[in-house]
Amino acid sequence: MEKYTKHTSVAALMNRSNVDTDQIIAKQFLKKVERTGFGAHLFHDWRFLEDGSPNPDFELNKPEFKDAKILVAGDNFGCGSSREHAPWAIDDYGFNTIISTSFADIFYNNCFKNGILPIEVDSDTLKALMSEINDNEGVSFTVDLENQQVSTPGGIEVKFELDGFRKHNLLNGLDDIGLTLEHIDKIDSYEAKHKANFPWLWAS
Amino acid sequence: MAQTMYEKIWDAHFVHQEEGQAALLYIDRHLMHEVTSPQAFEGLKMAGRGIRNTHSILATLDHCVPTKMADRINLPDPIGAKQVQTMMNNCEEHGLTLYDMESRNNGVIHVVVPEHGFVHPGMTTVCGDSHTATHGAFGALAFGIGTSEVEHVMATQCLPQAKSKTMLVKVDGKLSKFSTAKDIALAIIGKIGTAGGTGYVIEYAGEAIEALSMEGRMTLCNMAIESGARAGLVAPDQKTYDFLEGKEFAPEGEAWNQALNYWKTLPSDADAEFDKVIELNAADIAPQVTWGTSPEQVIPVNHAVPAPSDFDTEGKQIACESALEYMGLESGTQMTDIEIDFVFLGSCTNSRIEDFRAAAEVARGTLVPDNVTAIAVPGSYLVKAQAEKEGLDKIFTEAGWEWREPGCSMCLAMNGDQLKPGERCASTSNRNFEGRQGKGGRTHLVSPAMAAAAAAAGKFVDLRTLEKT
């Protein structure tokens, strides 16, 4: 996994709440057995017209947002299905940061497994960030993971909360499974005890 | 110290916690289907890792499988067929139990797992599927995970987890005979919203929850995720034990007694404290219908479609406006005046035998109008066989319904069963998101009996006004 570092990037605005994983990556694209190539299908039903051409009314099709790495979106982003294809598509499209007031639980977890930083801010801050983009489409925000801060040319400086372990893994691009396997002796001894306490779990 | 059921299960599965890191939680059961697992198997292989406990895994094919027999023999979609084949190869290679399409145990993962007693009270259970919450009906801590976590559990039998907050949803009073577990689930989501449970594990309790059958509790817990919760739980009781006893993976003999003694220690202590408590009275819960594109956009069937001005926040007003546009509805229209084109009876929410009995009761002697298509999709072959044994299939087909093979089908429309743009569907599934049942399709979530009433009338019907002629 790539390390997440401090960056200054275009912030795209998606002023919709409850953006669900069915919209992020529609079911017809879930049949692939690979992890790659989902970016082409991100927000498919909103992004493309019937004939397959880009929908000019869809916000992310604005040329100002073309190189955006930061997505600023409404409440409860990523609700619905557990499909990790959603963060795969977001990552593959080019976003590495999503800012909202809240994220659905499974989606939030899935982001960290894919080097994406979901940032939670309060609703007044979100409004301010959104209006700065509205006033100046194509504006770049700076995200500093080490200092847990988002700053904008308009003078917004906001700190965000983040679990220390997740931050560490993101900064260092670490593989979760490797970290768990460092505790294999603890897992072995837990499992032996668990087997003794609940023998029926192993009967089949 | 007094503990909630969630805290008891957490403590019993706590393996280790490194300072400043998430806790490692041991996972007892790992359920799988073809959509969210292939990349996890590939990841394992690339890292040279194996599966720690193959006996913890039960797999099925459900999302991509066609519900018409001819198509099941020869899958018409080559990409879906490849996904199915990949699952079969992965299970074969690792020696995993798979209920493939030829198995009489095949069906939707969250329907077949309880049928075989694979998940017990107090177990930790995961699946790359958000509706894993279903198994909370047994007093198991069950939640959906992403594909990276599927790989993590296969390799380590553990997951790094942050502890959730606890919410008690207490539903006292008696449900009317026209309302069901589905209506309770929708009413709760209507009250707390689709993000209301975010960060929480919900425990459902109270007189109305105790009165639910195991099927009803599965329907309720299934939709815990639709309120944003990590998991839903119902305390195990005699109904739970009776349901499990004698099932293939249930303990036997002395082990049964040992297990039973443990299960009885699981319910939350009487003086346990929850971080949040929500109360509803079951008597107030009318049959529900969603009008919008989020499960929280739900009202009693005898109400009218709301207007943006009925909502107090700007976000909800915008959401209402865009939902009305997508759904092709006008504020003020009575729900019972809304005509439908399609009815879907199925999904991991409502495709168990009890659901088919409830729908058949209403469908008996009715006729689906020519301009409406109604499909009944059992959750598993065992449900299908039981329904056929009871003659329910005849009631549906004589009423003009299609009687299909099991699968997820039109819950998420991956298998070819889907709505055309603009078509309106009364659906017993769990999500009414834009495009969920097909691009441009309009989904209204309802209970099985409400779906059957809508199928007969070609529009939504308040079950409470239905007179049998």
Image (cartoon, rainbow, N blue to C red):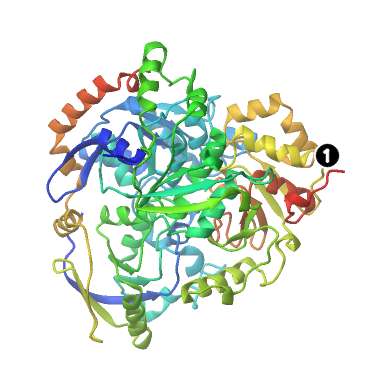
The image quarter containing residue B397 is top right
Binning the other alpha carbons within 10 Å of mark 1 as few (below 14), some (14 to 19) or many (20 upward) gives some
Quadrant in which the N terminus of chain B appears = top left
Q: Is residue B292 left or right of residue B387?
A: left
Q: Amino acid at mark 1?
A: Gly
Q: A92 or B348: nearer the eye?
A: B348
The residue under label 1 is B365
Q: Is residue B413 visible?
A: no
Q: Position of residue A85 (x, y in %)?
A: 38, 53
Residue B239, position as x, y percentages in the image: 52, 28
In the picture, measured across the screen, residue A128 lies left or right of residue B177, that is left
Q: Nearer the viewer, residue A166 or B182?
A: B182
Q: Relative to B356, is A133 on the left or the right?
A: left
Q: Residue at x 23, y 85 (%)?
A: A153
Foreground: B434 or A77?
Answer: A77
Residue B175 location, x and y as percent? 62, 45
Q: Is residue A166 left or right of residue A10?
A: left
Q: Quadrant of residue A133?
A: bottom left
- For the image, the number of numbered tags is 1
- For label 1, the SS is loop
Is B461 above or below relative to B382? below
